[in-house]
Image: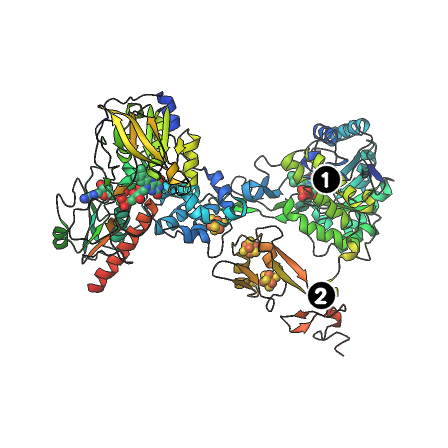
Amino acid sequence: MADLTSNFCGISSPNPFWLASAPPTDKEYNVRRAFEAGWGGVVWKTLGSEGPPIVNVNGPRYGAIWGADRRLLGLNNIELITDRSLEINLEEMARIKRDFPDRALIASVMVPCEEQHWKDIVPRIAETGVDGFELNFGCPHGMSERGMGSAVGQVPEYIEMVTRWCKESTDLPIIVKLTPNITNIIYPATAAKDGGADAVSLINTISSIVSVDLDDMAPNPTIDGKGTAGGYCGPAVKPIALNMVAQIARTAETQGLPISGIGGVTTWRDAAEFLALGAGNVQVCTAAMTYGFGIIKEMTAGLSGWMDEKGYSSVDAIVGRAVPNVTDWQYLNLNYTAKARIDQDSCISCGRCYAACEDTSHQAIAMSDDRVFTVKDDECVACNLCVNVCPVDNCITMEQISAGELDERTGQPVAAEYGNWTQHPNNPMSKAAE
Amino acid sequence: MASSGQVEQLESGRVSKEQLDTNFSDLHPEFDAHEAAVAADRCYFCYDAPCVTACPTSIDIPLFIRQISTDMPLASAKTIFDQNILGGMCARVCPTETLCEEACVREAAEGKPVEIGRLQRYATDVSMRADHHPYTRAANTGKRIAVVGAGPAGLAAAHRLAMLGNDVDIFDAGAKPGGLNEFGIAAYKATDNFAQEEVEWLLQIGGIELHSGKALGKDFTLTDLGSSHDATFIGIGLESVRNLSLDNENLSNVENAVDFISRLRQSSDFSKVSVGSNVVVIGGGMTAIDAAVQSKLLGAEEVTLVYRGSQTKMPASQYEQEIAKSKGVRFIFNAKPISIKGSVAIEHIEFEQAMPKPAANKNFVLETDHILKAIGQLLTEDSQYLEIEGSKIKVNSLLETSLENVWAGGDCVSAGDDLTVTAVAQGRDAAENIHSKLMGEG
Ligand SMILES: Cc1cc2nc3c(=O)[nH]c(=O)nc-3n(C[C@H](O)[C@H](O)[C@H](O)COP(=O)(O)OP(=O)(O)OC[C@H]3O[C@@H](n4cnc5c(N)ncnc54)[C@H](O)[C@@H]3O)c2cc1C
Ligand SMILES: Cc1cc2nc3c(=O)[nH]c(=O)nc-3n(C[C@H](O)[C@H](O)[C@H](O)COP(=O)(O)O)c2cc1C
Ligand code: SF4
Ligand code: SF4
Ligand code: SF4
C-alpha cells in the first residue's frame, strides 16, 4: 500500500487532501465531521479582525453552470470571510486541534493592510495550536472593495510586505494564497517568496458572472434585482489552476517553493495531476460542497490504488514528475508528425468528426455514401479536433509517423531529428535561417 | 369503421376498474422537463443524421432535440410540425424501434438509442398544451379541394393545403374524424381522447370544413367532386376486413380484431367492454398484437396469438412482440386455421401446424370462446374509375391516381408501409403536389 502521509512545508497530515478555506471549514461541527470522514487537513474559514464580524447577504450567494443531468461544473459565490466572531472561532479551533492532533489545522487570515493588525492577530491565533497560517490575498469580491483579499493579492509589493509582517510574528509556516485575477502568476508568487513565505496555495476563485437572468435582466445570483461579480470555482477552473501551478513549479524565480494546489479538485485523478505538476498537496472546496465529505474515501483509495499500480511508494515521489515535460511552444518538436486513425470497428458513424474537420478544420475526413469515415492522410495536420469531438472513447487516435516515412501532406519524409521553432527556417530570428 | 354490436355471450368487467386504469395507462408517459433535458443531452447532433433518413416524414431530429436541450420546446415542436403535423400522435404510435430509433447511431453503439419518440412527445405536448396553433394561412388561392377521409393521410393533406391558402372540404364516412387514430390505435398508446384533441388543434388553422357521415360511393362520387372542387385527395384507408374463408365464420364471437379494438376505443368505460376468457387471435401484424394485448388487459385468462408464418417473418416488430409476451400473450407460429366448430357460438378452432417436412404437418385444436381475426384490411373498392395495383389504389411518385386531378395517400394506396407516419408523409406530399399543379395552371 502506498504511503499517503504528507509533509507540506513542515506540516504533516495523514493524506494530502485538505479542505480549502470555505463553508466546509466554517465551524467546529463541519470540521469534526470532515476529520471523522478522513480528510487530512483543514484550512479554517478565513478569520477577520476582532470586533463585530462581517455580514453576508441574506439572499442567494451561489450561482452555477451545469453539464448533462445538472452535473455541477462551475460554482460562483459572493460569500465573504467568516461571519462569526473571532473568539468563537478560536475556541473551536483549539478544541479541534486537541481532539485531532494528527490532522493539519491551518488558520486562514485576512485583516486590513496595516502592520499592527497582522502582528496582533497572528500570535493570538497561534495559541489555538494551529499548524500554520494561510494569508488570504485571494477573495475577489466584497473584501477587495475594502482593500483586502485580492486587492492585496494584485499588488506584489503588498504581498511581500504583509508576508514579512507575519513571518516576524510567528515561527509557524506561512502559506500565501494567491488570486488568479492577475496577468502573470509569477509576480505575486515571487513576492510571496521574497517576503519569506514557506509556501503558496492557489488558486482562489476567479472573478466571474455565471449567468444572466433574462427575465429580471440581472446577473445571477440576483438579490433584490441586482447582482455582482462573484468568485468562480469547481471543475471548470481546474485547467487555469493547473497552468498556474505548473508555471510556479517551473519558473526559475519560484522553483522549489512548496505549492498547495487548489481549483476544481474533484477526484483522485485531479489531485494526482496537481501533484504531478508540482503541488505538494491539494485543497478541495466545491467537490465537498457538491457531494459532501464522503468523497474523501474515493480520493484516498483512488490515489493510493493508482500509486500502487504505478509503483510510487510516497506522495513525494509523484510531486513535480510532470514538470520537466512542461515547456514553451517554441521548444516543441516541429518534426514530430502524426495522423488521425479511425477504428472502424468502434466507429458508430455519427459524422461528428466529418462535420468538425470539413466545416472548421482541414477537410481531412472523407465520408462515403454508406457513412464510412476515413482520414485523408494528404490533408490531415493531426490537430486532434476529431479526437476531441468523437463521442466514442479511443475511436480516433493519433498515430505517429516514424522517421523516414512519407508525410503525404507535405510530400516529404518525416525528419528523424528534433527541430523546433527557434531553429526553423521560417523564423526570422532562427540560427538556421542565417 | 363498420360497427359490430356488443357480442352477446362475452363477459365484461373481468378485472376491477382500478386494475383497468393501470392496464390501460400510457405506454410511455410524458417526460418532465428535466427528464427531457437528460434524454436530449444524449443526442450527438449527427452530421446528415441517419435518424432523419429513417423517419418517413424526415423530421429534423437533431435540430428539434437541440431545441429541447436549449429549453425551447415550442420552437422544437415547430421543427417537428413543419414536417409532420400529426407529430403528437406519431410520437405515441410510431414503431420507433423500426424507424428513427433503429437508425440512431447510439442504437448501433450501445443498444440504447436516443429516445426520439418520447422527446418528440415532450415537445409536441408542451406546444399543444400552450394552445396556440403555430401556423397561419397564406393568401387565399381561390381554390377549393376535396379531401376524402379524415384519417392521418386526409388530415395532413387538408392542413397543408389550407396552410398554402386553399379552402378544403373533408368528407368522412364515420361519425368522428381521426380514422384509425380514433378507432384503431391501441388504447394505451393514445390515452385521454388525444386523437380528437389533435384533430381540433389541427383544424385551428382555419379554412377546413369537416363533413362527417359523408361517404364516397354512397353520398357522392368522384365525378361529383370533380365538378364541385378543383382537385380531390383520397385517404380512405382500408375499410374492409379480410376473411378466413372458412365455414362457420359467422358463428357468434368470431369477431374482426379491428371491430373489437374499435368498440374498446369508443368505450368510455372499459369495464363494459366484453371479451372472451379464452381468446384466439389470428394474424401477425400490429392489429393482431394490439387485439391480443388489449384482450389480456381487459381480463381474458388465456390469449393465444396464432400466426401462419415464422417468428422472424412476423410483421409486428420484436418490440411489439415483447410487449405482448410481457402481458402474458402466448404465441404459436407456422399454423393456419383449417376449421371452426361450434353450435351458436364458437367452441373450438383447428389449425394445421407446418413442419420442416410438409409430410410431417400436424393438426391441433384450441378451445376458445372468442376469435379475433386480424389477417389484414382491404380497400373497400367500389370505384370502377380508379386503377388498382395489388389490392390498393395505384399512384405514381407524385401520388397521382389514374384519374385526372385525383391524388391519394395513406393505407389505401399501393406505396409505402401501412403506418400513421407514412400516411402523414403522403398526405403532406400530395398536398404540396396538388398545390403546385393548381398554381401552375392558375
Ligand atoms: C388495430 C390497428 C393498430 C394500429 N397501430 C398502429 C401503430 O401503433 N402505429 C402506426 O404507425 N400505425 C398503426 N396502425 C396503422 C395506422 O393506423 C394506419 O396506417 C393509418 O391510420 C392510415 O391512415 P389513413 O389516413 O390512410 O387511413 P385511416 O386511418 O384508416 O383513415 C381513413 C378514414 O377514411 C374514412 N373513410 C373510409 N372510407 C370512406 C369513404 N368511402 N368515404 C369517406 N370516408 C371514408 C374512414 O372513416 C377513416 O376516417 C394500426 C392499424 C390498426 C388497424
Ligand atoms: C462559498 C465559498 C466561500 C469561500 N470562502 C473563502 C474564504 O473565506 N477564504 C479563502 O481563502 N477562500 C475562500 N473560497 C475559495 C476556496 O477556498 C477555493 O480556493 C476555491 O473555491 C477553489 O477551489 P475549488 O475549485 O475546489 O472550489 C471560497 C469558496 C467558496 C465556494
Ligand atoms: S486531426 Fe484535425 S486535420 Fe486531421 S482529420 Fe482530425 S480534425 Fe482533421
Ligand atoms: S466522430 Fe467518431 S464515431 Fe462519429 S463518425 Fe467520426 S470516428 Fe465515427
Ligand atoms: S442518430 Fe441518434 S444521436 Fe444521431 S442525431 Fe439522430 S437521434 Fe441524435
On screen, residue B18 versus residue B341, left or right, reads right
In this view, the residue in front, B147 or A271, is B147
The vertical placement of B271 against B197, above or below, is above
Quadrant of residue A357 within the rendered picture: bottom right
Residue at mark 2 = A402
Q: Are marks 2 and 1 on the same chain?
A: yes
Residue B242: image quadrant is top left
Q: Amino acid at mark 1?
A: Gly
Position of residue A307 measured from the top left corner of the image (x, y, whole percent):
78, 43
Marks 2, 1: nearer the viewer: 2
| Outermost residue toward the front in this view | B359
Q: Residue A129 versus residue B415: which sits nearer the camera?
A: B415
x and y percentages locating residue A214 in the rendered image: 48, 46
Residue at the image point whose x is 26% and y is 31% from the top: B255
Give the mark count: 2
What is the chain identity of the residue bearing mark 1? A
Q: Which residue is mark 1?
A: A302
Q: Which mark is residue A219?
A: none
Q: Is residue B137 left or right of residue A194?
A: left
